[in-house]
């Protein structure tokens, strides 16, 4: 699914000046640039990157087309690491893997990692589920872990209903799946009957329709749909912690389920295509405001400034 967002003008007369603004994002309608910028990858940070793309086209470069797709982190890297040049950016909810870096080197692609925000893996349940609103980290692990053999809710904790647990999550194309499997489940097998989905809207719909559902995805998707879902508070040992923009920090209370999210830039394309570099700089300059508006915890100013200085150094 490709998002193509373009500025729309209503021409009242030849003397009318139309100025568009966006809350929280710098307005610098300098114009004078054209071409296209192509991003693919993570469905998790699609919300954030598509927001930045929209604001860039509205507020800065109306003649540049910024296209944002969401095939998933791993599938996105396959489109990014292409001989002769693939996409300009790959959005990722995990770090690039060694084998992906090796392929980039083999293809002669210079890759720059740009951290854009922090996200928290959010465990969600159906609104009718009133018993599992607070779980320990181990209980969450056991629910999704094949070897734990927690088939019914009553297997998780005494007093929970004698009803089957229905587990849901994003599929293997997504960095969220990989983070959950690698970091939270420590690379142990998920339950065999888990329902894994490529499309996040489908995943959301399934959880909202199943009283016994429990699933996981990034905090931004929960924030956009919190009227239809309940976020489980997780007890990491010091009492239950709710995922919020305040707790989702690298050294925060929700840290065990917190991860950075990135966009990866093809440096060669940034040097050859002015619009690619210009969008990269704009994205880093406005990442904090866009992160907060789309359900991500912002990075410190100094960390983003270091990325901006690197990108400014690529200007010819």
Image (cartoon, helix red, strand yellow):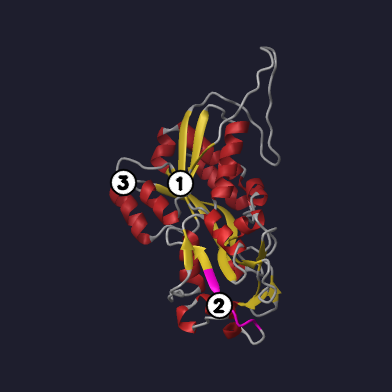
Q: Is residue 181 magenta?
A: no
Measuring from the top left, give residue 217's x and y in whole percent: 56, 62
Q: Mark 3, residues whose alpha carbon is within 10 Å: few (<14), some, or many (≥20)?
A: some
User: Alpha carbon of mark 2 to alpha carbon of mark 1: how far?
Assistant: 37 Å
Task: Tell me which label, 2 or 1, sits earlier in the chain.
Answer: 1
Residue beneath disc 1: 40
Count of marks placed on residues: 3
Does residue 306 show up? no
Q: Nearer the viewer, residue 33 or 86?
A: 86
Q: Nearer the viewer, residue 205 or 87?
A: 205
| Image quadrant in which you'd find residue 286 | top right
Residue beneath disc 3: 108
User: Alpha carbon of mark 2 to alpha carbon of mark 3: how far?
Assistant: 51 Å
Q: Which residues are magenta?
A: 160-167
Residue farthest to the bottom? 158
Does residue 52 show up? yes
Mark 2 residue element: loop
Residue farthest to the top? 14
Residue beneath disc 2: 164
Residue plotted at (50% across, 32% down): 65
Where residue 177 is drawn, which disc sits there?
Answer: none
Residue plotted at (60% across, 72% down): 212
Mark 1 residue element: strand
Position of 168 with respect to 187 (left or right) is: right
């Amino acid at each position: 699914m490709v998002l193509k967002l373009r500025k729309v003008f209503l021409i009242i007369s030849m003397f009318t000046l139309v100025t568009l603004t966006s809350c929280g994002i710098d307005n610098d309608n300098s114009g004078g640039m054209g071409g296209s910028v192509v991003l693919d990858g993570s469905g998790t940070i699609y919300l954030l990157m598509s927001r930045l793309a929209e604001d860039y086209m509205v507020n800065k470069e109306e003649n540049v087309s910024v296209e944002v797709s969401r095939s998933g982190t791993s599938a996105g890297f396959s489109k990014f690491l292409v001989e002769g040049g693939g996409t300009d950016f790959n959005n990722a909810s995990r770090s690039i893997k060694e084998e992906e870096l090796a392929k980039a080197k083999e293809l002669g692609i210079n890759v720059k990692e740009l951290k854009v925000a922090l996200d928290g893996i959010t465990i969600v349940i159906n609104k009718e589920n009133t018993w599992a609103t607070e779980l320990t980290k181990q209980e969450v692990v056991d629910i999704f872990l094949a070897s734990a053999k927690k088939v019914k809710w009553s297997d998780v904790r005494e007093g929970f209903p004698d009803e089957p647990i229905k587990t849901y999550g994003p599929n293997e194309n997504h960095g969220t799946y990989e983070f959950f499997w690698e970091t939270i489940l420590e690379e142990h097998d998920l339950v065999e009957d888990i329902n894994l989905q490529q499309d996040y809207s489908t995943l959301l719909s399934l959880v909202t329709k199943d009283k016994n559902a429990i699933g996981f995805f990034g905090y931004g998707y929960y924030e956009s749909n919190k009227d239809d879902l309940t976020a489980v508070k997780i007890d990491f040992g010091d009492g239950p912690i709710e995922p919020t923009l305040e707790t989702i920090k690298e050294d925060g209370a929700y840290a065990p389920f917190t991860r950075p999210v990135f966009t990866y830039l093809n440096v060669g394309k940034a040097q050859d295509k002015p619009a690619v570099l210009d969008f990269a700089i704009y994205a880093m300059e406005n990442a904090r405001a866009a992160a907060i508006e789309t359900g991500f915890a912002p990075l410190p100013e100094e960390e983003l400034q270091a990325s901006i200085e690197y990108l400014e150094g690529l200007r010819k």
